[in-house]
Amino acid sequence: MIKISQVNHHIGNATILRNIDLTIQNGGITALVGPNGAGKSTLLSLIARLIPLQQGQIWLDEKDIHKTSSREIAKHLAILTQDNAIHSRITVRDLLMFGRYPHHQGRPTEQDNDIVEQALKRFELQDFSQRFLSELSGGQRQRALIAMTFCQQTQHILLDEPLNNLDMFHARELMRLLRKLTDEFNLTTIMVVHDINMVAAYADTIVAMKDGQIRLVGTPDEILTPKNLQEIFSLDAELIEYQGKKVVLHHL
Ligand SMILES: Nc1ncnc2c1ncn2[C@@H]1O[C@H](COP(=O)(O)OP(=O)(O)OP(=O)(O)O)[C@@H](O)[C@H]1O
């Protein structure tokens, strides 16, 4: 469980996050949605301990995240941020093995090799395994980075806009795979997603943010209404239902 209590965050005079209270139960996919600049990435970075907490508390199960070492946190929580300052002269296979680092500390075992092999297979990266990241397309690189995050084999996975750079086919494949892995390993997957229809189809819970605040929390069925879309995104959109899922017609 991730429990966020009374978190506030400021940069200079600007308030970036305001009175954030949120509990994310273990298991399932939670989608963080909201307009650009709402504070989604900042909140993910605070949960993953990538930036210092200024005010409030964040708990990962029984651990106070900001009082626990990064090494300990890395065994329970993996994050893929938007700015991946990863050296491009590394092969896909080595990148995935790098994801195992919190476990092997530089000395990979047979088990680490197996996990990397499985991830190469599941993320369909076998054909690229010996290629450098610089030799991949943007979408292929994004898949490799997500696979690396999974190789960490943590119970909690945070992904900031994982669908970036993916074409329609690979975006859907990735969402299906994330759904499958989340269910199979009972993971807690938290992701920032802009494609609201992917959220409608694959997320269990939506957390909608705006202006540094959490405005709505609920299931896609509860949250996706014309009134809420207007309130969060200032968007006039119609909704239809298809195969029991909401579809937002926002492009017309
Ligand atoms: N280092 C920084 N210095 C100043 N302002 C910042 C900094 N980092 C973020 N911000 C501001 O904080 C606000 C929240 O940014 P954040 O990246 O968390 O939003 P977001 O909801 O993830 O947006 P997006 O959907 O565009 O990725 C924005 O107004 C942004 O300009």
Image (cartoon, rainbow, N blue to C red):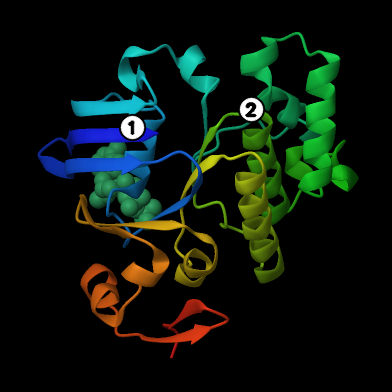
Camera-side residue of 189 and 100: 189
Vertical arrangement, residue 110 with respect to residue 210, above or below: above
Please give left or right for residue 133 compared with residue 4 in the image: right
Residue occupied by mark 2: 152
As drawn, 68 above or below 172: above
- The numbered mark, 1 or 2, whose residue comes first in the sequence reads 1
Identify the secondary structure beneath mark 2.
Answer: loop
Considering the numbered disc 1 on the image, is that residue within a helix, a strand or a loop? helix
Please state if 188 lies on the left or on the right of 67 as rendered: right
| Front in this rendered view, residue 34 or 84 | 34
| Residue most extreme to the bottom | 252
- At label 2, the amino acid type is Gln
Q: Nearer the viewer, residue 229 or 145?
A: 229
How dense is the environment of label 1, judged by Cα within 10 Å: few (below 14), some, or many (20 and up)? many
Residue at image location 66% in from the left, 17% down from the top: 101
Amino acid found under the numbered disc labelled 1:
Leu
In front: mark 1 or mark 2?
2
Q: CA distance from mark 1 to mark 2?
A: 19 Å
Name the residue located 65 percent from the left edge and 65 percent from the top edge.
172
Tell me the number on the disc at residue 46: 1
Q: Position of residue 154 (x, y in %)?
A: 58, 29
- Does residue 234 show up? no
